[in-house]
Amino acid sequence: MAELNLVLLGPPGSGKGTQGERLNEDLRLPYYATGDILRAAVRDKTELGRTAKGYMDAGDLVPDEVIVGVIVEALDSDAARDGFILDGFPRTTPQAEALDAKLDELGRRVTAVLLIDVTDDEVVRRIGGRRTCAENGHVFHVDFNPPKREGACDIDGSELITRDDDNPATIRNRLNQYHEKTEPLVDYYDQRSVLRRIDGEKDPDEVAEEIRRTLATMRLEQDEAV
Ligand code: AP5
Protein backbone atom coordinates (compact mmCIF):
# COMPACT_ATOMS: atom_id res chain seq x y z
CA MET A 1 0.00 0.00 0.00
CA ALA A 2 1.80 3.12 -1.18
CA GLU A 3 0.20 5.71 1.03
CA LEU A 4 -2.10 5.85 4.06
CA ASN A 5 -4.72 8.59 3.95
CA LEU A 6 -6.63 8.09 7.19
CA VAL A 7 -9.72 9.73 8.69
CA LEU A 8 -10.70 9.34 12.36
CA LEU A 9 -14.48 9.62 12.72
CA GLY A 10 -16.58 9.44 15.88
CA PRO A 11 -18.62 11.42 18.38
CA PRO A 12 -17.07 14.05 20.66
CA GLY A 13 -15.03 12.36 23.36
CA SER A 14 -14.90 9.01 21.58
CA GLY A 15 -11.10 8.97 21.74
CA LYS A 16 -10.12 10.37 18.33
CA GLY A 17 -7.42 12.58 19.84
CA THR A 18 -6.15 9.82 22.16
CA GLN A 19 -5.84 7.35 19.29
CA GLY A 20 -4.66 10.02 16.83
CA GLU A 21 -1.63 10.75 19.04
CA ARG A 22 -0.75 7.05 19.13
CA LEU A 23 -1.22 6.62 15.39
CA ASN A 24 0.94 9.66 14.83
CA GLU A 25 3.72 8.02 16.90
CA ASP A 26 3.31 4.67 15.12
CA LEU A 27 3.00 5.87 11.55
CA ARG A 28 4.94 9.16 11.60
CA LEU A 29 2.42 10.74 9.26
CA PRO A 30 1.29 14.37 9.50
CA TYR A 31 -1.64 14.62 11.90
CA TYR A 32 -4.25 17.32 11.37
CA ALA A 33 -6.77 17.67 14.21
CA THR A 34 -9.16 20.45 13.27
CA GLY A 35 -10.25 21.05 16.89
CA ASP A 36 -6.59 21.59 17.92
CA ILE A 37 -5.96 23.82 14.89
CA LEU A 38 -9.02 25.94 15.73
CA ARG A 39 -8.18 26.15 19.46
CA ALA A 40 -4.63 27.33 18.58
CA ALA A 41 -6.15 29.97 16.29
CA VAL A 42 -8.47 31.14 19.10
CA ARG A 43 -5.50 31.32 21.50
CA ASP A 44 -3.41 33.26 18.97
CA LYS A 45 -6.38 35.57 18.21
CA THR A 46 -6.01 35.09 14.44
CA GLU A 47 -8.85 35.89 12.03
CA LEU A 48 -9.68 32.15 11.87
CA GLY A 49 -9.80 32.02 15.67
CA ARG A 50 -12.02 35.10 15.96
CA THR A 51 -14.47 33.57 13.46
CA ALA A 52 -14.46 30.13 15.09
CA LYS A 53 -14.66 31.05 18.79
CA GLY A 54 -18.41 31.71 19.08
CA TYR A 55 -19.33 28.50 17.26
CA MET A 56 -16.92 26.42 19.36
CA ASP A 57 -18.04 27.87 22.69
CA ALA A 58 -21.66 27.03 21.80
CA GLY A 59 -20.75 23.51 20.65
CA ASP A 60 -21.79 24.28 17.06
CA LEU A 61 -19.75 23.36 14.02
CA VAL A 62 -17.87 26.20 12.38
CA PRO A 63 -19.11 26.89 8.82
CA ASP A 64 -17.77 24.51 6.16
CA GLU A 65 -16.13 27.30 4.16
CA VAL A 66 -14.08 28.31 7.22
CA ILE A 67 -12.53 24.90 7.85
CA VAL A 68 -12.33 23.36 4.36
CA GLY A 69 -9.68 25.85 3.19
CA VAL A 70 -7.45 25.02 6.17
CA ILE A 71 -7.41 21.29 5.41
CA VAL A 72 -7.17 21.64 1.63
CA GLU A 73 -4.08 23.81 2.07
CA ALA A 74 -2.51 21.29 4.49
CA LEU A 75 -3.09 18.36 2.11
CA ASP A 76 -1.51 20.28 -0.74
CA SER A 77 1.79 20.46 1.14
CA ASP A 78 4.82 18.20 0.59
CA ALA A 79 4.51 17.03 4.21
CA ALA A 80 1.29 15.13 3.39
CA ARG A 81 2.64 13.49 0.22
CA ASP A 82 3.01 10.00 1.75
CA GLY A 83 -0.24 10.14 3.67
CA PHE A 84 -1.95 11.87 6.56
CA ILE A 85 -4.19 11.39 9.60
CA LEU A 86 -7.27 13.60 9.81
CA ASP A 87 -9.00 13.94 13.20
CA GLY A 88 -12.28 15.86 13.31
CA PHE A 89 -12.47 16.44 9.56
CA PRO A 90 -14.64 15.87 7.61
CA ARG A 91 -17.65 16.46 9.84
CA THR A 92 -20.34 17.21 7.26
CA THR A 93 -21.20 15.82 3.83
CA PRO A 94 -20.00 19.02 2.05
CA GLN A 95 -16.66 18.68 3.91
CA ALA A 96 -16.36 15.03 2.80
CA GLU A 97 -17.12 16.03 -0.79
CA ALA A 98 -14.53 18.82 -0.63
CA LEU A 99 -11.95 16.33 0.69
CA ASP A 100 -12.74 13.86 -2.11
CA ALA A 101 -12.51 16.65 -4.71
CA LYS A 102 -9.09 17.73 -3.43
CA LEU A 103 -7.77 14.16 -3.30
CA ASP A 104 -9.16 13.48 -6.81
CA GLU A 105 -7.26 16.51 -8.05
CA LEU A 106 -4.09 15.03 -6.48
CA GLY A 107 -4.83 11.56 -7.93
CA ARG A 108 -5.37 10.13 -4.45
CA ARG A 109 -8.21 8.81 -2.28
CA VAL A 110 -9.11 8.20 1.34
CA THR A 111 -7.57 4.84 2.32
CA ALA A 112 -9.62 4.19 5.47
CA VAL A 113 -12.09 5.88 7.77
CA LEU A 114 -11.79 4.55 11.33
CA LEU A 115 -15.12 5.00 13.09
CA ILE A 116 -14.52 5.00 16.85
CA ASP A 117 -17.86 3.82 18.16
CA VAL A 118 -19.06 4.80 21.66
CA THR A 119 -22.48 5.46 23.22
CA ASP A 120 -23.71 8.92 24.22
CA ASP A 121 -23.55 7.97 27.93
CA GLU A 122 -19.88 7.07 27.60
CA VAL A 123 -19.23 10.38 25.82
CA VAL A 124 -20.68 12.29 28.76
CA ARG A 125 -18.55 10.30 31.26
CA ARG A 126 -15.39 10.84 29.30
CA ILE A 127 -15.74 14.51 28.50
CA GLY A 128 -16.78 15.26 32.08
CA GLY A 129 -13.38 14.03 33.35
CA ARG A 130 -11.15 15.15 30.51
CA ARG A 131 -8.15 17.38 31.22
CA THR A 132 -6.19 18.88 28.33
CA CYS A 133 -2.65 20.21 28.29
CA ALA A 134 -2.69 23.97 27.75
CA GLU A 135 0.43 24.03 25.58
CA ASN A 136 0.05 21.14 23.10
CA GLY A 137 -3.40 19.62 23.64
CA HIS A 138 -2.22 16.28 25.13
CA VAL A 139 -5.24 14.53 26.61
CA PHE A 140 -5.82 12.93 30.05
CA HIS A 141 -8.80 11.76 32.11
CA VAL A 142 -9.10 12.11 35.88
CA ASP A 143 -10.14 8.43 36.25
CA PHE A 144 -9.34 6.57 32.99
CA ASN A 145 -5.96 8.10 32.14
CA PRO A 146 -4.74 10.25 35.05
CA PRO A 147 -1.48 12.24 34.73
CA LYS A 148 1.43 11.08 36.90
CA ARG A 149 1.50 14.47 38.66
CA GLU A 150 -1.89 16.08 39.30
CA GLY A 151 -2.54 19.16 37.16
CA ALA A 152 0.57 18.74 34.96
CA CYS A 153 1.04 17.16 31.53
CA ASP A 154 3.22 14.00 31.56
CA ILE A 155 4.68 14.89 28.17
CA ASP A 156 5.57 18.58 28.32
CA GLY A 157 4.85 19.53 31.95
CA SER A 158 2.41 22.29 31.04
CA GLU A 159 -0.77 23.00 33.01
CA LEU A 160 -3.78 20.74 32.53
CA ILE A 161 -7.03 22.62 31.94
CA THR A 162 -10.72 21.86 31.33
CA ARG A 163 -11.63 22.91 27.79
CA ASP A 164 -14.13 25.80 27.48
CA ASP A 165 -16.53 23.57 25.54
CA ASP A 166 -16.38 20.66 28.03
CA ASN A 167 -19.45 21.69 30.05
CA PRO A 168 -22.76 19.78 30.25
CA ALA A 169 -24.87 22.12 28.04
CA THR A 170 -22.24 22.32 25.31
CA ILE A 171 -21.60 18.58 25.40
CA ARG A 172 -25.31 17.95 24.74
CA ASN A 173 -25.26 20.30 21.76
CA ARG A 174 -22.03 18.76 20.39
CA LEU A 175 -23.67 15.33 20.55
CA ASN A 176 -26.77 16.66 18.74
CA GLN A 177 -24.56 18.21 16.07
CA TYR A 178 -22.73 14.91 15.68
CA HIS A 179 -25.91 12.86 15.21
CA GLU A 180 -27.47 15.38 12.83
CA LYS A 181 -24.51 16.48 10.69
CA THR A 182 -21.61 14.04 11.09
CA GLU A 183 -23.26 10.63 11.49
CA PRO A 184 -24.46 10.63 7.83
CA LEU A 185 -20.76 10.24 6.94
CA VAL A 186 -20.89 6.67 8.28
CA ASP A 187 -23.08 5.71 5.28
CA TYR A 188 -21.14 8.00 2.96
CA TYR A 189 -17.89 6.14 3.63
CA ASP A 190 -19.51 2.72 4.01
CA GLN A 191 -20.84 3.06 0.47
CA ARG A 192 -17.28 3.78 -0.69
CA SER A 193 -16.05 0.62 1.15
CA VAL A 194 -13.48 2.47 3.26
CA LEU A 195 -15.31 2.48 6.61
CA ARG A 196 -13.84 0.38 9.44
CA ARG A 197 -15.70 0.17 12.76
CA ILE A 198 -13.62 0.18 15.94
CA ASP A 199 -15.11 -0.63 19.35
CA GLY A 200 -14.18 2.56 21.21
CA GLU A 201 -15.58 1.43 24.58
CA LYS A 202 -12.61 -0.76 25.42
CA ASP A 203 -9.50 0.33 27.26
CA PRO A 204 -7.36 2.81 25.21
CA ASP A 205 -4.59 0.19 24.69
CA GLU A 206 -7.11 -2.34 23.38
CA VAL A 207 -8.64 0.26 21.06
CA ALA A 208 -5.14 1.08 19.75
CA GLU A 209 -4.49 -2.64 19.21
CA GLU A 210 -7.76 -3.07 17.27
CA ILE A 211 -6.79 -0.13 15.06
CA ARG A 212 -3.35 -1.65 14.41
CA ARG A 213 -4.92 -5.00 13.51
CA THR A 214 -7.46 -3.32 11.24
CA LEU A 215 -4.77 -1.40 9.35
CA ALA A 216 -2.59 -4.52 9.05
CA THR A 217 -5.50 -6.52 7.61
CA MET A 218 -6.24 -3.73 5.15
CA ARG A 219 -2.62 -3.71 3.99
CA LEU A 220 -2.74 -7.49 3.44
CA GLU A 221 -6.01 -7.25 1.48
CA GLN A 222 -4.63 -4.46 -0.69
CA ASP A 223 -1.33 -6.29 -1.31
CA GLU A 224 -3.27 -9.41 -2.36
CA ALA A 225 -5.43 -7.36 -4.71
CA VAL A 226 -2.37 -5.99 -6.59
P1 AP5 B 1 -12.80 18.77 18.50
O1 AP5 B 1 -11.69 19.23 19.32
O2 AP5 B 1 -12.52 17.95 17.28
O3 AP5 B 1 -13.85 18.06 19.47
P2 AP5 B 1 -14.69 16.70 19.35
O4 AP5 B 1 -14.93 16.08 18.05
O5 AP5 B 1 -15.90 17.10 20.11
O6 AP5 B 1 -13.79 15.66 19.95
P3 AP5 B 1 -13.09 15.75 21.28
O7 AP5 B 1 -11.77 16.46 21.13
O8 AP5 B 1 -14.03 16.31 22.31
O9 AP5 B 1 -12.90 14.23 21.68
P4 AP5 B 1 -11.99 13.07 21.10
O10 AP5 B 1 -12.81 12.15 20.27
O11 AP5 B 1 -10.72 13.60 20.50
O12 AP5 B 1 -11.69 12.31 22.46
P5 AP5 B 1 -10.41 12.33 23.41
O13 AP5 B 1 -9.32 11.49 22.84
O14 AP5 B 1 -10.06 13.73 23.81
O15 AP5 B 1 -13.68 20.01 18.00
C1 AP5 B 1 -14.03 21.06 18.88
C2 AP5 B 1 -14.91 22.07 18.14
O16 AP5 B 1 -14.20 22.62 17.01
C3 AP5 B 1 -16.20 21.51 17.54
O17 AP5 B 1 -17.24 21.45 18.49
C4 AP5 B 1 -16.46 22.54 16.43
O18 AP5 B 1 -16.99 23.73 16.94
C5 AP5 B 1 -15.07 22.84 15.91
N1 AP5 B 1 -14.66 21.96 14.79
C6 AP5 B 1 -13.61 21.08 14.79
N2 AP5 B 1 -13.53 20.46 13.59
C7 AP5 B 1 -14.54 20.94 12.83
C8 AP5 B 1 -14.98 20.67 11.51
N3 AP5 B 1 -14.35 19.78 10.72
N4 AP5 B 1 -16.06 21.35 11.05
C9 AP5 B 1 -16.70 22.26 11.81
N5 AP5 B 1 -16.33 22.56 13.08
C10 AP5 B 1 -15.26 21.91 13.60
O19 AP5 B 1 -11.00 11.52 24.67
C11 AP5 B 1 -11.97 12.11 25.52
C12 AP5 B 1 -11.67 11.73 26.99
O20 AP5 B 1 -11.86 10.32 27.17
C13 AP5 B 1 -10.24 12.03 27.43
O21 AP5 B 1 -10.25 12.46 28.75
C14 AP5 B 1 -9.50 10.67 27.29
O22 AP5 B 1 -8.44 10.54 28.21
C15 AP5 B 1 -10.64 9.69 27.59
N6 AP5 B 1 -10.54 8.46 26.81
C16 AP5 B 1 -10.15 8.33 25.51
N7 AP5 B 1 -10.23 7.04 25.11
C17 AP5 B 1 -10.70 6.35 26.20
C18 AP5 B 1 -11.03 4.97 26.43
N8 AP5 B 1 -10.87 4.03 25.45
N9 AP5 B 1 -11.51 4.61 27.65
C19 AP5 B 1 -11.68 5.54 28.62
N10 AP5 B 1 -11.39 6.86 28.46
C20 AP5 B 1 -10.91 7.26 27.27
Image: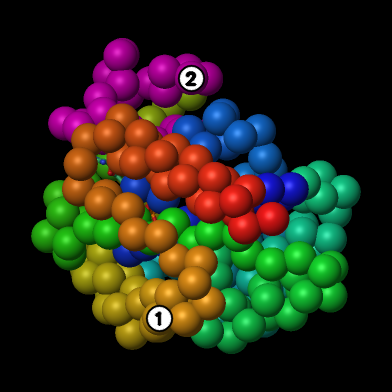
Q: Which residues are magenta?
A: 133-157
Instruction: Please name the residue that numbered disc 2 is placed on.
Output: 155
Spot occupied by residue 140 in the image (x, y as percentages of width and height): 33, 33
Name, please, the residue furthest toward the right. Answer: 78
**Label 2 secondary element:** loop
The circle drawn on residue 145 is none
| Magenta span contains residue 42 | no
The location of residue 76, given as percent across then percent down, is 84, 60
Q: Mark 2: give few (<14), some (14-19) or many (20+) Cα within 10 Å.
A: few
The chief SS type of the magenta part is loop
What residue is rendered at 33% in x and 84% in y? 180
Q: Residues within 10 Å of mark 1 (few under 14, many from 20)?
A: few
Magenta span contains residue 136:
yes
- Residue 11, x across and y down, in percent: 33, 63
Percent of width and height locating residue 53: 52, 66
The residue under the point 59% across, 85% down is 94
Could you tell me the amino acid type at mark 1? Asp
> Label 2 sits on what residue type?
Ile
- Disc 2 versus disc 1: nearer the observer: 1
Residue at left 52%, top 84%? 93
**Direction from residue 59 to residue 93 in the image, left or right:** right
Q: Residue at point 31% right, 30% down? A: 205
In the picture, measured across the screen, residue 83 lies left or right of residue 27, that is: right
Q: Is residue 218 visible?
A: yes
List the residue tagged with mark 1. 187
Mark 2 or 1, nearer chain start: 2
The correct choice, above or below, for 134 with respect to 194 in the image is above
The local secondary structure at tag 1 comes to helix
State the CA–CA distance, disc 2 to disc 1: 37 Å
